[in-house]
Amino acid sequence: MNMNTNLHNYYAQRAAHYEEIYQFPERQTELIGIATQLQHLLKDKKVLEVACGTGYWTELYAAIASQVVATDVNAEMLAIARAKQMPAERVSFQEADAFALPDGDFNACVAGFWWSHVKRSEQSAFLEGLQKTCGSGSVFVMFDNCYVEGSSTPIARTDMEGNTYQIRRLPDDSRHEVIKNFPTDSTLRKKLTQHARDIRVVRGTYYWMLTGVLR
C-alpha cells in the first residue's frame, strides 16, 4: 500500500515552505505544549518517527531520546531534515512509506500530522503495521490539527467513506486536493482501542494529542 500520489506530490513540492505552518503567533503556546510532552514521553526511548517531514519535531526531542529512526516517503522533505544539526550517532533518517516501516529495536513511536492524511479504510492497516514494527508495550504518540473555522483551510468535499478533503495552493499558485480528516475524540478512541491501551486525548484550540501504549 502506497501513500496517495496527490499527497506525495503535494508535500514534495511544499517541502521548502513546510515549516511556515509553525510560525502563526496564536498557535505557539500549544506547539510548545506538544514539544514539552514529546520530550517527557520520549526521554531515553528508542523512537520510530512516522512521516517526519522536515525533521521539525525530530529536532525538538532528539537530544533526549536514546535512538531515533525518523522516516518519510518524500526525499525532498528528508533532505531538509538531514541538513539539521542532530547527533548522527543517535538520529538517522530513512525514506520509507508509512505502510512499510523499517525493522528496528523500538520502544516508542510518534506520528505528527500524519493521521489526518490516512484514509479511514487504511487506518487499521497503518496501526497494525506500527504494532508489528514497534511491538507491544511501546509508547505511542500522535498529534494533529483541529479544524478551526476561519483559520483552517475549508473542507472542499467529503467522499463516500467520510474522508474530507481540502484544496491547497502552493507558492507557485498550483492547486492540490489533499485528504485532511479531523477526527473527534470518540472516533480516535474507538479506532485506537484495538491497538493501544491507556489512551489519553488532549485537545486544544488548534491541535489534539493522543498518547497510549501499543498492545
Image (cartoon, rainbow, N blue to C red):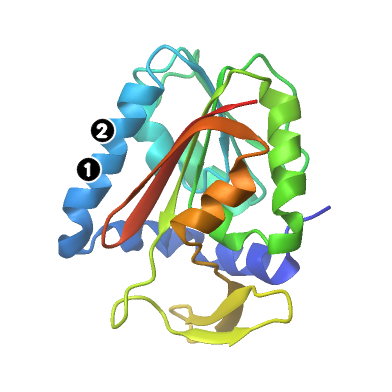
Q: Does the residue at mark 1 contact the one at mark 2 (Cβ under 8 Å)? A: yes
Report the disc number at residue 52.
none
For the question of whether residue 165 can be seen, the reply is: yes
Give the quadrant of the C terminus: top right
The residue beneath circle 1 is 32
Q: Decide: is 33 above or below 133.
A: below
Image quarter for residue 85? top left
Q: Decide: is 197 above or below 95.
A: above
The residue beneath circle 2 is 36
The amino acid sitting under disc 1 is Ile
Image quarter for residue 34? top left
Q: Residue 2 at x, y = what percent?
A: 79, 55
Q: Is residue 185 left or right of residue 77?
A: left
The amino acid sitting under disc 2 is Thr
Q: Is residue 48 left or right of residue 73?
A: left
Q: Decide: is 31 above or below 168.
A: above
Q: Residue 134 at x, y = what percent?
A: 66, 23
The crowd level at tag 2 (other Cα within 10 Å; few <14, some 14-19, many 20+) is few
> Residue at horizontal 43%, vertical 34%?
58
Q: Is residue 122 left or right of residue 182?
A: right
For the question of whether residue 84 can be seen, the reply is: no
> Residue at horizontal 31%, vertical 32%?
37
> Residue at horizontal 68%, vertical 38%?
194
Q: Residue 210 at x, y = what percent?
A: 44, 42
Q: CA distance from mark 1 to mark 2?
A: 6 Å
